Amino acid sequence: MKLKKTTEKSKPTKKRKKKKVYPQVTKGMLLEELYEDPEFVEMTKVSIKTIFDKTFIVASKNLAAGDHVVLAKFGKFETIEKEAQMKMNPSTQEEIEVPAHKVVKFKLSKSIKEKMNK
């Protein structure tokens, strides 16, 4: 004699909105484009990758020190201090204090903004 399995009703789940997917350019894609550029014909992939990586290591150190990092014709990374704030935890509705902290803000250059809006 077979026993019937009883199934509990599952809780209704909230339907999540699908995240919008944007085209991405990866680090590998950037490196490949640099490698194929005629200006870098005498450089190896390894040397291009090393320069690329070191650039961001130096920029990261400067941002951590509180400096602004300006990349001409691209944009500016700024370190900004946020004051302590009271915020609400969305899952528990409990108010929590978010301590003062630093964040990085990016401002795109005018030339790129103009190219984007053509």
Image (cartoon, helix red, strand yellow):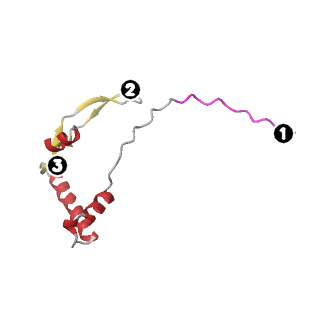
Quadrant location of residue 4? top right
Would you say residue 2 sits in the magenta stretch? yes
Dot 1 or dot 2, earlier in sequence: 1
Dot 3 or dot 2, earlier in sequence: 3
Identified at 33% across, 60% down, the residue is 28
Q: In the picture shown, does residue 87 fall above or below 77?
A: above
Would you say residue 7 sits in the magenta stretch? yes
Q: Where is residue 14 in the image (x, y as percent from the top left)?
A: 50, 29
Q: In the picture shown, does residue 49 fall above or below 118?
A: below
Task: Give the SS element for disc 3.
Answer: loop
Q: Where is residue 59 in the image (x, y as percent from the top left)?
A: 17, 55
Task: Give the SS element for disc 1.
Answer: loop
Residue at mark 3: 74
Q: In the picture shown, does residue 115 fall above or below 95?
A: below
* Label annotation for residue 2: 1
Name the side, left or right, on which 22 lies relative to 2: left
Q: Where is residue 52 in the image (x, y as percent from the top left)?
A: 23, 62
10 Å crowding of disc 1: few (<14), some (14-19), many (20+)? few
The amino acid marked with disc number 2 is Gln
Image quadrant in which the N terminus is located: top right
